[in-house]
Amino acid sequence: MKRLGFATVVFLAGLVLAVGWWKHSLSPVDNINRSTKTFVVNKGDGVKEISVNLKNAGLIRDQVSFFLLERFFIKNSPQAGNFQLSPSMSAQEVAEKLTVGTQDVWVTIPEGWRSEEIKDFLIKKLPAIAADPMFKTVSWREYEGKLFPDTYLVPTEIGSSKFLGLMLENFSQKVNFPVTQEQLIIASMVEREARREQDRPLVASVITNRLEIGMKLDIDATVQYAVGQTQKDGWWKQELTIDDLAIKSLYNTYTNPGLPPGPICNPGLSAISAAANPAKSDYLYYVADKKGITHFARSLEEHNANIAKYLQ
């Protein structure tokens, strides 16, 4: 009986401590501090990862208790999005807040889109941008090449200048190595011309090799940029005609030597890296086959042989 009584006392003491720990760990980090922080839950984040991130952000006291709370006491799972949370909120309040979907949306800008293409997409994806008075007054084309392609989590009501600022800021953060304007122009051509990442440094080398000897670039993508939007193909015309190749434009590298006056699209990081660090080669020609594999040549004879082999 004495042993049973002692065990009961130990059990009750342990229970009291556990209840105390549970209540304390779920209480607000700071009752007085009502300031808010933006907490981001990314797609695919699990409860364990969210618990750790909340603890590191100073928004909950204990990640283990929050994990248990989410798993066993909260009916709905956390949603992806941006959430305004405060240290004055209890863990219960934080958990419930994360289950309510925000008005944020994921917006993906692919590599190789031109500024007008991005604007067209955003009008359909985010109607608030089209309603923004700044949308018509700000020329995005002057930022061509620096509208960094990526996936962005943004409020549905985000304005034009705000989204523009996000892309430019992202460019500054992701491109953390020196890149000249000339290299950025080359990167934009590499992005449109080379599908495979492993081909891009060599395509960049062909462009730089031609520039060094004063040879015209003859790049189709620059003509596509000059032609602009067509009813059939959108912003990138697929089958260029003889008239297209003779179009009067500073962007036409078939009729103008040297680089075009600016980037022709917004390249991704691999194309920018390739332009900043082109491969060492003596290639002057390339052609991409139907599978997107690029084949290189040192002479026109080799190039014509590649065309006959891979395109006919």
Image: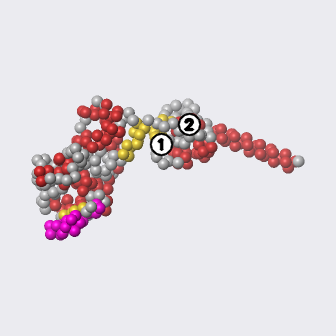
The residue tagged 1 is 80
Give the percent coordinates (x, y) of residue 3. 85, 49
Q: Residue at x 33, y 51 (%)?
A: 176
Q: Is the image coloured rainbow, by chain, by secondary structure, or in one colour?
A: secondary structure
Is 296 a magenta residue? yes
Is 278 a magenta residue? no
Q: Residue at x 28, y 32 (%)?
A: 134
Question: Label 2 sits on what residue type?
Answer: Glu
Q: Residues within 10 Å of mark 1 (few under 14, many from 20)?
A: many
- The answer to whether any part of residue 52 appears in the image is no
Q: Quadrant of residue 200?
A: bottom left
Name the element at disc 2.
helix
Please tell me which residue lies in front, 178 or 40. Answer: 40
Q: Quadrant of residue 164?
A: top left
Above or below, 189 against 70 in this view is: below
Q: Residue at x 59, y 40 (%)?
A: 75
Residue that sits furthest to the right in the current view: 1
Query: Magenta segment, which residues?
Result: 291-312
Q: Left or right of 7: which side holds 249?
A: left
Give the percent coordinates (x, y) of residue 223. 17, 51
Above or below, 288 against 61 in this view is: below
Q: Left or right of 113: which side holds 48?
A: right
Q: Residues within 10 Å of mark 2 (few under 14, many from 20)?
A: some
The residue tagged 2 is 96
Q: Residue at x 52, y 31 (%)?
A: 34
Question: Label 1 sits on what residue type?
Answer: Ala
Q: Are marks 2 and 1 in contact (CB under 8 Å)?
A: no
Give the percent coordinates (x, y) of residue 58. 53, 41
Above or below, 161 against 310 in this view is: above
Q: Report how far apart the C-alphas of labels 2 and 1 lie in the structure.
A: 13 Å
Please tell me which residue lies in front, 34 or 189. Answer: 189
